[in-house]
Amino acid sequence: MTAPTFNTGTWNTATLNDPAIKRGSWNTGTLNAPTINTPIMHRGSWATGSFTSPTVTTPTINQGQWNTGTMNDAVIARPIVSLGSWSSGTSTDPILTRPTANLGAWNTATLNDPAVNRPAMALGSWSTATMTGKVTVPAASFTRTELSAPAGRKSLQVVSATITVVAGSGNVYAIVPETGTLDGIDMSVTDTLAASDTNYLAITVTNLGQAGAGTTAMLDGTDANSTKTTGGSGFTTNAKRSLSLSTVGALAVTSGDRLFLQVTQIGTIANSVTFPVWLLRFAGTT
């Protein structure tokens, strides 16, 4: 079909075999219980239409758009979106089997109680969509980067010995759990330590790498990571202290990297600091 227009009409219980829409539009129409086999859309649009109980088999959308439509109780088998968009639509109780988005977008759609089986996405996007109810996906379908920031993080907590006037007393080591990027370090202690510009603690974290010889500094080298009065701050009992990270290029880690968490005493600190707890958060890249 070349440049077809289907406007404000109704196709009821139709079987459409191998339909192709090129630069055309199915617009504001109603399709009740249709069977649509192997449709191809090239620069066309199924827009603002209503689809009741459709069965859509192996649809291909190439630079086209299924837009602001309503699809109720849809069964959509092996859809492919290539440079196209399923946008701003509402799908109720859909079953999507083996969907693939290739450089395309399923965007701002509402999917109610969907079952999504074996989805694949290559450089595409399911973006700002609302998916209500049970979503069924197979194991290992999503990488950490495709998850939300909290879901994609790996956290590691370590406790060091009491920080005293003895050099190196509060140092501790940690092993990176998964490949990713360090995106936060919090520290907390059970004793207050007043800030001082002459007697203070300087905090550093060094990535020693896999062989233990690395020298990458993972914290900002400024006084922000110290207990100095000028530029830093003291410790407050049981209060969280967020440390200042280094530049992005220094934060990449590989599973098994050994990190050296170091507390260096400058001068003589006023008192010991007990139960230093470190919490390291790693964002996913795999």
Image (cartoon, grey):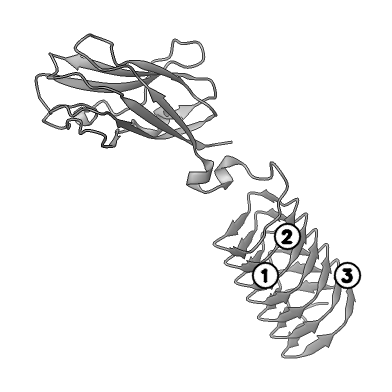
Label tally = 3
Query: Which residue is the site of mark 1?
Result: 65
The numbered mark at residue 284 is none
Counting residues from the start of the chain, the first of labels 1 and 2 encountered is 1
Residue sitting nearer the eye, 116 or 286: 116
**Nearer to us in this view, 74 or 171:** 171
Q: Is residue 68 left or right of residue 214?
A: right
Which residue is identified by label 2?
Answer: 115
C-alpha separation, residue under disc 1 versus residue under disc 2: 22 Å
Q: Secondary structure at mark 1?
A: strand
Crowding near pointer 1: few (<14 within 10 Å), some, many (20+)? many
Amino acid type shown at disc 3: Asp
**Which amino acid does the dot numbered 2 rest on?**
Ala
User: Which residue is depicted at the point 83% across and 62% down?
Assistant: 58
Mark 3–mark 2 contact, CB under 8 Å?
A: no
Image height check: is 56 above or below 231? Answer: below
Q: Nearer the viewer, residue 144 or 222?
A: 144
Q: From the viewer's perspective, tell me whether residue 232 is left or right of residue 254.
A: left
| Quarter of the figure that contains the N terminus | bottom right
Label annotation for residue 18: 3
Foreground tag (1 vs 2): 2
Q: Residue at x 69, y 74 (%)?
A: 45
